[in-house]
Image: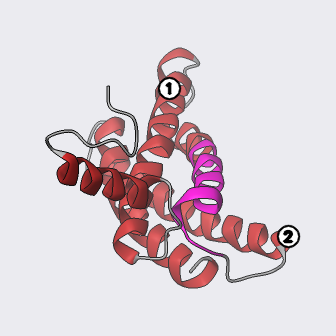
Amino acid sequence: MQRAGKRNRHGKIDDAMEAIVYKLFRDTAEDIHVQVLRYVLAGTAAYIVDYAVLIFYVEFLKIHYLPAAAAAFLFGAAISYVLSIFWVFGGRRLKSVFLEASLFFSLVIVGLSLNHFCMWFFTGHLGNHYLLSKALSTVIVSAVNFSSRKYILFR
Protein backbone atom coordinates (compact mmCIF):
# COMPACT_ATOMS: atom_id res chain seq x y z
CA MET A 1 0.00 0.00 0.00
CA GLN A 2 1.31 3.46 -0.90
CA ARG A 3 1.67 6.12 1.75
CA ALA A 4 0.17 9.54 1.18
CA GLY A 5 2.60 11.80 -0.64
CA LYS A 6 4.51 9.02 -2.38
CA ARG A 7 4.18 8.62 -6.10
CA ASN A 8 3.60 5.40 -7.95
CA ARG A 9 3.11 4.97 -11.67
CA HIS A 10 -0.43 6.38 -11.31
CA GLY A 11 0.64 9.28 -9.08
CA LYS A 12 -1.51 11.98 -10.66
CA ILE A 13 -4.60 9.75 -10.71
CA ASP A 14 -4.04 8.71 -7.09
CA ASP A 15 -3.60 12.33 -6.04
CA ALA A 16 -6.77 13.33 -7.88
CA MET A 17 -8.75 10.48 -6.29
CA GLU A 18 -7.39 11.37 -2.87
CA ALA A 19 -8.44 15.00 -3.38
CA ILE A 20 -11.94 13.94 -4.45
CA VAL A 21 -12.36 11.59 -1.50
CA TYR A 22 -11.10 14.29 0.86
CA LYS A 23 -13.51 16.87 -0.56
CA LEU A 24 -16.50 14.51 -0.47
CA PHE A 25 -15.97 12.98 2.95
CA ARG A 26 -13.67 15.09 5.11
CA ASP A 27 -13.53 18.69 3.92
CA THR A 28 -16.15 21.29 4.87
CA ALA A 29 -19.31 20.96 2.83
CA GLU A 30 -19.77 24.38 1.25
CA ASP A 31 -20.64 23.09 -2.23
CA ILE A 32 -24.30 22.13 -2.82
CA HIS A 33 -23.26 18.99 -4.75
CA VAL A 34 -21.15 17.76 -1.84
CA GLN A 35 -24.01 18.56 0.54
CA VAL A 36 -26.49 16.60 -1.58
CA LEU A 37 -24.16 13.58 -1.75
CA ARG A 38 -23.53 13.71 1.98
CA TYR A 39 -27.24 14.20 2.65
CA VAL A 40 -27.99 11.08 0.61
CA LEU A 41 -25.37 9.08 2.53
CA ALA A 42 -26.53 10.42 5.91
CA GLY A 43 -30.13 9.83 4.86
CA THR A 44 -29.26 6.27 3.93
CA ALA A 45 -27.85 5.69 7.42
CA ALA A 46 -30.93 7.28 9.00
CA TYR A 47 -33.20 5.27 6.68
CA ILE A 48 -31.53 1.99 7.66
CA VAL A 49 -32.16 2.77 11.33
CA ASP A 50 -35.72 3.93 10.59
CA TYR A 51 -36.49 0.87 8.47
CA ALA A 52 -34.94 -1.58 10.96
CA VAL A 53 -36.87 -0.09 13.88
CA LEU A 54 -40.09 -0.16 11.82
CA ILE A 55 -39.65 -3.84 10.97
CA PHE A 56 -38.75 -4.67 14.58
CA TYR A 57 -41.83 -2.89 15.96
CA VAL A 58 -44.25 -4.33 13.42
CA GLU A 59 -42.92 -7.86 13.00
CA PHE A 60 -41.57 -8.63 16.47
CA LEU A 61 -43.47 -6.37 18.85
CA LYS A 62 -46.68 -6.55 16.76
CA ILE A 63 -47.28 -2.80 16.91
CA HIS A 64 -49.62 -1.36 14.24
CA TYR A 65 -47.65 0.05 11.28
CA LEU A 66 -48.71 3.70 11.81
CA PRO A 67 -47.44 4.23 15.40
CA ALA A 68 -44.45 2.00 14.59
CA ALA A 69 -43.64 4.18 11.58
CA ALA A 70 -43.86 7.32 13.72
CA ALA A 71 -41.50 5.96 16.37
CA ALA A 72 -39.08 4.61 13.77
CA PHE A 73 -39.11 7.95 11.95
CA LEU A 74 -38.01 9.72 15.14
CA PHE A 75 -35.05 7.36 15.55
CA GLY A 76 -33.99 8.11 11.98
CA ALA A 77 -34.48 11.85 12.54
CA ALA A 78 -32.10 11.81 15.50
CA ILE A 79 -29.41 10.14 13.38
CA SER A 80 -30.06 12.64 10.60
CA TYR A 81 -29.76 15.61 12.97
CA VAL A 82 -26.40 14.56 14.32
CA LEU A 83 -25.01 13.86 10.85
CA SER A 84 -26.45 17.11 9.48
CA ILE A 85 -24.71 19.16 12.14
CA PHE A 86 -21.33 17.50 12.04
CA TRP A 87 -20.97 16.33 8.45
CA VAL A 88 -23.58 17.22 5.81
CA PHE A 89 -23.78 21.00 5.94
CA GLY A 90 -20.81 23.36 6.05
CA GLY A 91 -22.17 25.77 8.59
CA ARG A 92 -25.02 26.87 10.75
CA ARG A 93 -27.37 29.76 10.15
CA LEU A 94 -28.29 30.13 13.81
CA LYS A 95 -26.01 30.86 16.73
CA SER A 96 -28.34 29.37 19.32
CA VAL A 97 -28.09 25.57 19.51
CA PHE A 98 -31.41 25.50 21.38
CA LEU A 99 -33.14 27.48 18.62
CA GLU A 100 -31.50 25.32 15.95
CA ALA A 101 -32.59 22.08 17.65
CA SER A 102 -36.09 23.49 18.16
CA LEU A 103 -36.39 24.43 14.49
CA PHE A 104 -34.89 21.11 13.40
CA PHE A 105 -37.39 19.13 15.42
CA SER A 106 -40.22 21.40 14.24
CA LEU A 107 -39.20 20.41 10.72
CA VAL A 108 -39.08 16.80 11.91
CA ILE A 109 -42.72 17.14 12.97
CA VAL A 110 -43.56 18.36 9.46
CA GLY A 111 -41.64 15.40 8.01
CA LEU A 112 -43.27 13.04 10.49
CA SER A 113 -46.72 14.33 9.48
CA LEU A 114 -45.90 13.89 5.81
CA ASN A 115 -44.48 10.42 6.50
CA HIS A 116 -47.59 9.48 8.48
CA PHE A 117 -49.87 10.69 5.70
CA CYS A 118 -47.87 8.80 3.04
CA MET A 119 -47.87 5.61 5.12
CA TRP A 120 -51.63 5.87 5.61
CA PHE A 121 -52.29 6.75 1.96
CA PHE A 122 -50.04 4.12 0.37
CA THR A 123 -50.93 1.33 2.83
CA GLY A 124 -54.29 2.16 4.34
CA HIS A 125 -55.86 3.71 1.25
CA LEU A 126 -54.08 2.04 -1.71
CA GLY A 127 -53.40 -1.28 0.03
CA ASN A 128 -49.62 -1.47 -0.51
CA HIS A 129 -47.42 -3.41 1.89
CA TYR A 130 -46.18 -1.13 4.68
CA LEU A 131 -42.52 -1.58 3.65
CA LEU A 132 -43.23 -0.44 0.09
CA SER A 133 -45.14 2.50 1.53
CA LYS A 134 -42.15 3.32 3.71
CA ALA A 135 -39.84 3.35 0.69
CA LEU A 136 -42.19 5.65 -1.25
CA SER A 137 -42.65 7.89 1.77
CA THR A 138 -38.90 8.16 2.28
CA VAL A 139 -38.34 9.53 -1.23
CA ILE A 140 -41.00 12.21 -0.74
CA VAL A 141 -40.02 13.17 2.81
CA SER A 142 -36.29 13.26 1.96
CA ALA A 143 -36.79 15.84 -0.77
CA VAL A 144 -38.83 18.06 1.55
CA ASN A 145 -36.37 17.57 4.43
CA PHE A 146 -33.27 18.47 2.41
CA SER A 147 -34.82 21.66 1.10
CA SER A 148 -36.11 22.80 4.47
CA ARG A 149 -32.89 21.98 6.32
CA LYS A 150 -30.70 23.56 3.66
CA TYR A 151 -32.60 26.83 3.40
CA ILE A 152 -33.87 27.24 6.97
CA LEU A 153 -31.22 25.74 9.24
CA PHE A 154 -27.90 25.21 7.55
CA ARG A 155 -25.82 26.84 4.81
Q: Which residues are magenta?
A: 74-91
Q: Secondary structure at mark 2?
A: helix
Residue 123 in the figure: left or right of residue 50: left
Q: Single out the mark in the foreground, 1 or 2.
A: 2
Marks 1 and 2: CB-CB under 8 Å? no
Whole-percent x, y for residue 55 in the image = 46, 26
User: Residue 56 or 32: which is nearer the viewer?
Assistant: 32
Determine if the magenta segment contains residue 76: yes
Residue 100 in the figure: left or right of residue 145: right
Compare marks 1 and 2 and give the one earlier in the sequence: 1
Q: Report crowding for label 1: few under 14, some 14 to 19, many 20 or more residues within 10 A (C-alpha).
A: some
Whole-percent x, y for residue 2 in the image = 32, 32
- Mark linked to residue 58: 1
Vertical placement of residue 39 versus 79, above or below: below
Residue at 21% across / 47% down in the picture?
11
The C terminus lies in which quarter of the figure?
bottom right
Whether residue 82 can be seen here:
yes
Amino acid at circle 2: Phe
Residue at 50% across / 54% down in the picture?
26
Determine if the magenta segment contains residue 61: no
**Residue position marked by numbered label 2 in the rendering:** 98
Residue at 47% across / 57% down in the picture?
115
The N terminus lies in which quarter of the figure?
top left
Residue at 35% across / 58% down in the picture?
19
Q: Secondary structure at mark 1?
A: helix
